[in-house]
């Protein structure tokens, strides 16, 4: 199953946002920032990554359902989905 690049733009944007948040976490740790601020930023990055992952899997499932030549079976899709849990 290959994902269409155009449909992945929202997930890509989320991942780029998470990348920026992770860079901020690293900088905050290097500067000795407040623990609460670091954890808040880390939590935001984690949520962005999770949401991007769910979006990617949802898009993949949708494409598989639309595809006439689907090679992905239900067990494989379930395994991918559960890998994010």
Image (tube, grey):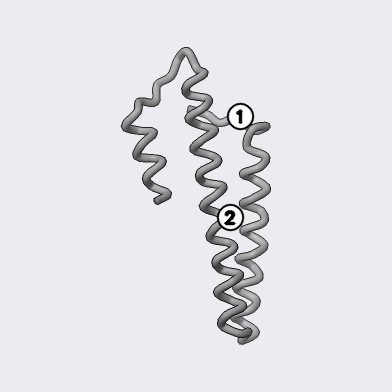
Callout 2: few (<14), some (14-19), or many (20+) C-alpha neighbours within 10 Å? many
Which residue is found at the position 58% from the left and 55% from the top?
Answer: 48
Residue 81, compared with residue 76, is above or below; it is below
Q: Residue furthest left?
A: 75
Residue 75 falls left or right of residue 39: left
Local secondary structure at mark 1:
loop
Q: How many marks overall?
A: 2
Where residue 8 appears, x then y in whole percent? 63, 37
**Residue 66, numbered circle:** none
User: Which quadrant of the structure image shows residue 47?
Assistant: bottom right
Q: Which residue is mark 2?
A: 48
Q: Position of residue 63 (x, y in %)?
A: 53, 25
Compared to residue 6, the image places residue 70 above or below, namely above
Instruction: List the single residue furthest toward the top.
Output: 68
Closer to the N terminus: mark 2 or mark 1? 1
Q: Position of residue 73 (x, y in %)?
A: 35, 25
Left or right position of 69 against 17: left
Who's the residue at 56% across and 82% down the image?
A: 35
Circle number at residue 4:
1
Residue at x-position 58% and y-position 62%: 45
SS at mark 2?
Answer: helix
Nearest to the eye among marks 2 and 1: give it.
2
**Cα distance between the residues tagged 2 and 1:** 20 Å
Q: Please report the residue visible at 61 percent of the width from the left and 82 percent of the height from the top.
A: 30
* Label 1 CA crowd tier, 10 Å (few <14, some 14–19, many 20+): few
Q: Are marks 2 and 1 in contact (CB under 8 Å)?
A: no
Residue 24: image x %, image y %? 66, 70
Identify the image quadrant of residue 69.
Answer: top left
Residue 17 figure quarter: bottom right
């Amino acid at each position: 199953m290959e994902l269409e690049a155009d449909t992945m733009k929202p997930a890509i944007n989320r991942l780029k946002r998470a990348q920026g948040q992770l860079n901020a976490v690293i900088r905050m740790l290097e500067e000795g920032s407040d623990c609460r601020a670091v954890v808040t930023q880390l939590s935001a990055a984690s949520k962005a990554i999770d949401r991007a992952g769910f979006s990617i899997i949802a898009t993949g499932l949708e494409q598989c359902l639309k595809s006439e030549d689907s090679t992905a079976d239900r067990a494989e899709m379930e395994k991918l989905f559960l890998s994010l849990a």
